Amino acid sequence: MDRAVTMDHYKAAMLLSGAGDALGFRNQRWEYNKSGPAIHKELEELGGLKNIKAELPDWPVSDDTILHLATAEGLATGKKGEELLHEVAARYVEGMKDMEGRKPGPSSILGVSQLRPGEDGGYRVPYNPEGTGCGAAMRSMCIGLRYPKPDQLLSLVAVAVETARMTHPHPTGFLGAVASALFAAYAVQRRPLTTWGVGLLNEGCPIARNFARGRGYAVDETERDWGYFCDKWQWYLDTRGISNGVGPPTWPDSYGPAERDQAYETFSLAGWAGRSGHDAPMIALDALLGAGSDWEELMSRAAFHGGDSDSTAVIACCCWGLLHGTRGVPEGNYARLEYRERLERSGELLYSLAH
């Protein structure tokens, strides 16, 4: 891991998150493939990761990167408070016009259709008991880039909760955004990976709960639906033997593509691994814990599995870029990526605002 975080790390975080998205998505082909072993076989037939040039037309980014860019570019304006929330809401509305072939999820489509940026309270949508998906988690890493310091934790959580609830008002959905933002901030802070999950449960979630109570929006529904996210994360940390924040993690004896598919399914809400707000960042962290500084291993675990593979990759690769930059990443995986300039520019702007 590189010790000091530089602007290049921020640019790598945004760029590699997009690369992970495009690679895990494979133009809809791999996101909807339920078999990790089958994906690995196709990868081998393509000549392996080092042989893939992630560029148009075959490797577009998905809805994940479009909405991550919307969040990042909104934050990069430097606006704060209500003004920032209207700005981000407006960018989500704009981003949904760029979804041809990118497969946005139902909660994202519904939520954005209900936004009225610029109107009083127009960044709020009605409570959606189905809003448990990963659509907020996958677009919120950049919030950790904007508010990376420990003394900015309240701002990080507030912005993560409020921007997430624009489409995912259910706590399983919006706490996923808190997790992604927090993990990116922890990467900037160089906190040991084994402490990230404990930090989420002990720092992020309690602050998010107090914040949600204080905002007076859908408080009863939020309280009613609160428990699942935290309970599942506690279960995961216990499973990996890192509930005290100390490593090394405990791994199954065999943990190849087939075994990971089975394990990730046990993480999931309804059998589709990485589909929900709690397990997209969970699989991302699992991959980061297991891959170290090895990009190919990270992608094997985070992007090439039989679940919502682009959403788990977008989170994992953003954090990995913050830790390692682009070192060891085949240039073809990102050199001509769709929206590369926007991704790197937003990284530069967020670095300037945060430092």
Image (cartoon, rainbow, N blue to C red):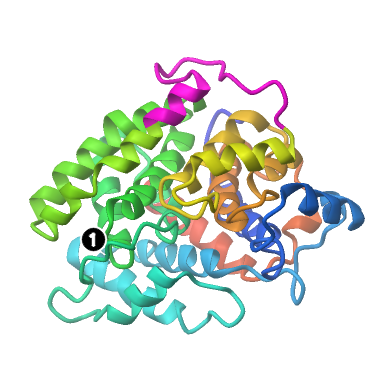
In the image, is residue 86 above or below residue 301?
below
Where's residue 194, x and y in %? 49, 23
Where's residue 95, x and y in %? 45, 77
Q: Is residue 254 magenta?
A: yes
User: Mark 1: which amino acid?
Assistant: Lys
In the image, is residue 299 above or below residue 136?
above
Where's residue 314, x and y in %? 57, 53
Q: Which residue is mark 1?
A: 80
Can the viewer see residue 217 in this picture? yes
Q: Along the horizontal axis of the image, is 68 left or right of 93?
A: right
For image coordinates 28% across by 57% down, the residue present is 170
**Placement of the N terminus among the 4 image quadrants:** top right
Q: Main secondary structure of the magenta part?
A: loop
For image coordinates 74% across by 74% down, the residue present is 56
Number of numbered tags placed on the structure image: 1
Comparing 51 with 131, the one in front is: 131
For image coordinates 71% across by 67% down, the residue present is 29
Comparing 237 with 62, the one in front is: 237
The residue range painted magenta reads 234-255
In the image, is residue 275 above or below residue 237?
below
